[in-house]
Image (cartoon, rainbow, N blue to C red):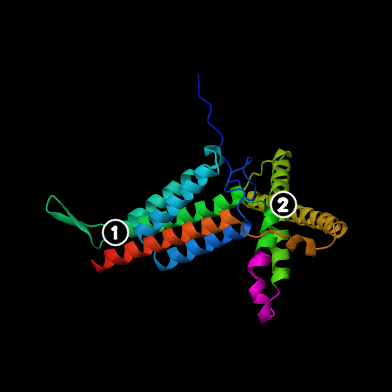
Amino acid sequence: MTGTRRPPRPVVLLLPVPGGSAIHDLWAGTKLLVVFGISVLLTFYPGWVTIGMAAALVATAAWIAHIPRGALPSVPRWLWIVLGIGGVTAALAGGAPLISVAGVEFGLGGALHFLRITALSIVLLALGALVSWTTNVAEIGPAVATLGRPLRVFRIPVDEWAVALALALRAFPMLIDEFQVLYAARRLRPKRIPRSRKARRQRHARELIDLLAAAMTVTLRRADEMGDAITARGGTGQLSARPVRPRIADWVTLGVTAVAGGAAVAIELICHLT
């Protein structure tokens, strides 16, 4: 009896996880501010303490939001191979700290730097995914318009930017589904097996051109349908006009994030001074 392999879990983004929680109920602008603040913090202080603090915040928020394990995508095998090659290459750089094995010293500095960068990347990806899993895409546009209101003094078209972002976020999952259907339909079509390598390259080129033409056609059709729907609902101004403001939970979230970030920076500075 042969065991069946489980199909890999796809990457699911821009689709909120069903259910409700305190994280789901937060204002979208609060989540964007938290992502921006943590990103800036990790840019200027990419130490282990700040990375651990950000990871703890993300893990706590995921636990509060009841994110299921099935929402996590499967890690492809080629990514593990790339990480392994990168780790070995970085380890060859050496550097402090040094360890001695059988009288031979090895530098762990390069490997530790690689691990730190990898951990930082994973934390930022998890933070973005958490926002995607707990936020409705319809709330992003109004939040960006509200946060960018002070920029209107400088004649910056904040509302137009918010509308463009809202349209892109709404169209992205829809277009992904359309492209997957097109690709599946293309694979089901009967194919003649080419006999030469040149014929195989020509066949792949023709298939690519056909897929691009079909994708452009589907995109234009979807854009026309979305434009008619937006016009029927009052125009693009409705995409960025949603009277939602921060509440007590939002201020508490921002305060906790600021305190945790400040504590992590203070610990980092104390460790460097000592």
Q: Give residue 127's position: percent from left, percent from top.
A: 51, 54
Whether residue 49 appears in magenta in the rendering, the answer is no
Residue type, mark 2 in image: Leu
> Where is mark 2, residue-wise?
175
Q: CA distance from mark 2 to mark 1?
A: 43 Å
- SS for callout 2: helix
Give the magenta part as a residue range.
144-157
Give me the disc on residue 37.
none
Residue 235 lies in quadrant: bottom right
Residue 166 lies in quadrant: bottom right
Circle nearer the N terminus (2, 1): 1
Q: Give residue 125's position: percent from left, percent from top.
A: 51, 54
Determine whether 20 is above or below 255 in the image. above
Can you say which quadrant of the picture contains the C terminus?
bottom left
Residue type, mark 1 in image: Leu
- Most common SS among magenta residues: helix
The residue positioned farthest toward the top in the image shown:
1
Q: Give residue 16's position: percent from left, percent from top.
A: 63, 46
> Where is mark 1, residue-wise?
92
Count of marks overlaid on the render = 2
Q: Callout 1: few (<14), some (14-19), or many (20+) C-alpha neighbours within 10 Å?
A: some
